[in-house]
Amino acid sequence: MPGPFSRAGVLAALIALLLACAWPGAAHADPAQSAQTARALVPSPQKGKGDACVADTDFMRRYHMTVLNHQRDDTVHNGIRTKQFSLKECIACHAVQGEDARPVSIESPKHFCRTCHDYAAVKIDCFECHASRPESNKAAQLPTGHGDGAVSALSRYLKGKGQ
Amino acid sequence: MTRRMEFHVPQHEKRGFEAAGVDRRDLLRGLVAGAGLTLASGVTLYAVGGVAEARAPGDPVSPEVRWGMLIDVNKCPDGCKACVTACSKENGWAETGSSLTDAQWIRKVEVTDPRTKTSRALPVMCQHCAEPPCVDVCPTGASFKRDDGIVLVDKHTCIGCRYCMMACPYNARSFIHEPLSDQKPHAPRGKGTVESCTLCVHRVDEGRSPACVEACHADGGGAMLFGDLNDPDSEISKRIAEYATQQIRGDLGTDPGVHYQNL
Amino acid sequence: MARIRYREIGSSTGFSALLAVLALFILGGLASAWYMEHHGHIVTGMNNLVVWGMPHVFAVFLIVTASGVLNVASIGTVFGRTPYKPMARLSGLLAIAFLVGGLAVLVLDLGRPDRLIVAMTTYNFKSIFAWNIFLYVGFLIVVAAYLFVQMERTMSGYTRAVGWFAFVWRLVLTTGTGSIFGWLVARQAYDAAVMAPLFIAMSFSFGLAAFLLIILAVCRVEGRDLGDGILTRLGRLLGVFAAAVLYFTSVQHLTNLYAAEHAGVERFILFEGGIYTLLFWGVQVILGGLVPIALLYAPELSAVRLRVALASALVIIGGLAQIYVIIIGGQAYPLVLFPGMDVQSSANDGAVTSYAPSLPEVALGLGGVALALAIAVIGLKILRFLPVSLADEIVDPAHAQTSGAGA
């Protein structure tokens, strides 16, 4: 039964995130190495497609649950179908390609929504109902944004955090 | 909400600056939208369903509208299950053979007059009552009626008590008895909550008609008509005004949004 | 009146053994709940038509009984019957214990028990179910207060007022529980105002029966006196309550028979329902109604202790059968979609739905019973709920003398 996540875990994750934010200098110095360190220490979600998230990245890191919950009520009760904070859109854009060239589902630790959550011991039940990956025919039309290699993606990811 | 506004604006500015990014995203969106259109053959739909003009995605549903359906039983062929199949495909539920525990958002019901032995079959789904008993009894308010008359379960607040299923006179609701996976992205469903026909709310919000109605016209007898019961000029309102139509268990005072003709 | 002395129950191997057995049942209930939660309700006998099953039979039974066991206290403090007063504390303790047991079963059967917090924070005030959440929580608080004013000597001036309040509250609570069913227009078996008074009568009867069984057992194990006089009185009362249940049951079925649209379900329950008909006549009416009444009013049969114990057990068995017939039988009978027509579909429309309770469901229900008993036993152990003696000359000196000669 999905219980409440541990406060301590969340705190740890936030501290880790803060630490990561103070890191861009190191990332500049040796992206590959710091990326590896980072992988060991902090969660490393893969970048979504495109260049930017639907809102400021820092804001999304901190408040994605708030905007999702708000969107959820807006959509379900008022039929508001804006795309910006739609969970369906998050999933479509943040799909992570798996071994079988299909986006991974929430079963995989590589799933975007699991990267930080596993680390922070956050448990969410959204994917008991919501599809955790885009439908295959639609996914096929989207570029994966995976070509430039994990390491450089990570280094860009870390740089992004410092801004 | 204030917070939402706060970053909403800068985000647009930001996008303005990052022209390249915008281009690419918009291109992608265009691609997806195009694909969706061809797949769903939306064009014919508007003609068939008689659906009012689509709302802007950011606008809330309006109580001016009451979505409903008219089913002409004479045009519903025996043995045709086009609506059932379409619903199942659209919303990702399937009959697994255990009819008592399977989700059945829509089913064909065979009604036989014991005296004359004449029988007919008609689709029955959530009747989208104006006075829904399921909504009255739901302890958390998860069962609710949207302003446009569509009766839904907010599965985020459904605790799975099943009192609504006790209260529904139409056997229209199903409880999800097993863990599910690979749901449709537009139709989330999960173990331990109650569900029923949503009148394809995700399609209606885009200005399309429900999957069953579309399929009934494409592959079935063209018995189903979807439209706005509040608009006196809609095809459905005109037909209801013109012909004698019935609601199932109209005597209970639930005022279903689904009407039947030639029952 | 002589001051009644109360004492905790003693430690013994029997006590530990009992707790161990109860703990085992509670664990079984929890394991079942986990199993049902993990696999979904597919592992139960419940389905889309019989949506409430064995857990609800037990839960409703426990909740109805909870308000009923409080009657002994009410008779004592509200209606001023002195002999019942010494048992008022136990009556309050049992009320809390049974309600907690019942609610635990209800909650653990939810499709999403993890969302309990939602149930506690979001309400739809049109729903009788939501009111019941308040009624239940309120009941616990009111009864706790009732116990407190009884046990804290400085507060004893408030006993009558709080007792009244608790009495009214419990009537409302049972009305609420009955209305869960009574307000369902969709189901032929339920749509009846008589459900509320019927449930009140049931609560009186089952509650007193449970109380009697428990006090008989505790006094026996503890070696405390329990007078024949007081037992006889309580037994007669149980007979009256059991008769009241029979009366309201017949009103329920007769009014339904009278209304043409409900005749079908009546025929089903009373004549053609197979197991439900058998449970109704055999267990509910005869075994759980007529036989106990006969036992309770036939003093020559055997010692009062044995008769009361037997009658109480039968009332409880009959009560479970009655709730089973109401809840399961009422759902098994098909919804009437098209009155007067034969109806058939892939969703079992128009046909009687079969239901067979599964082991996890029963285990969950029994777990709730065990939880209630465990709370009661632990309560008795740590606080002074039970008088040292319930002998007639102590609880009811006046009556003991007069009836002593006659009996």
Image: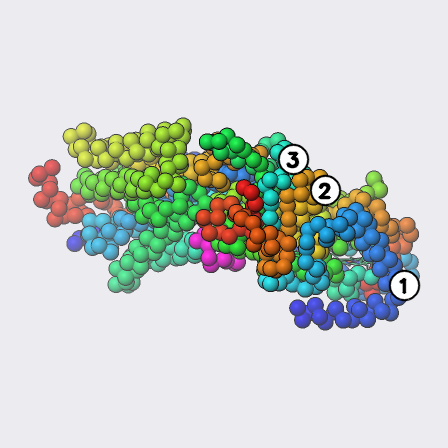
Mark sitting earlier along the chain (3/2): 3
* Label annotation for residue B80: 3
Quadrant in which the N terminus of chain C appears: bottom left
Q: Are marks 1 and 3 in contact (CB under 8 Å)?
A: no
Q: Secondary structure at mark 2?
A: helix
Identified at 51% across, 52% down, the residue is B255
Q: Chain of mark 1?
A: B
| Residue ID for mark 2 | B218
- The image quarter in which residue C272 lies: top left
Q: Secondary structure at mark 1?
A: helix
Q: Residue B253's x, y, as percent?
A: 46, 52
| Residue ID for mark 1 | B20
Of circles 1 and 3, the one toward us is 3
Q: Provide the residue span drawn in magenta.
A: C119-130
Mark sitting earlier along the chain (1/3): 1
Q: Is residue B79 left or right of residue B141?
A: right
Question: C300 and B232: which one is in front?
Answer: B232
Q: Residue A11's x, y, as percent?
A: 68, 59
Q: Residue C37's x, y, as percent?
A: 57, 41
Label 1, label 3: how far apart the Cα atoms are: 52 Å
Question: A52 and C262: which one is in front?
Answer: C262
The answer as to whether the residues below labels 3 and 2 share one chain is: yes
Q: Are marks 3 and 2 in contact (CB under 8 Å)?
A: no
Mark sitting earlier along the chain (2/1): 1
The answer as to whether the residues below labels 2 and 1 share one chain is: yes
Q: Is residue C50 visible?
A: yes
Kind of residue indicated by mark 3: Cys
Identified at 42% across, 38% down, the residue is C330
- How packed mark 2 is, by other alpha carbons closer than 10 Å (few <14, some 14-19, many 20 or more), is some
Kind of residue indicated by mark 2: Ala
Q: Is residue B67 left or right of residue C204?
A: right
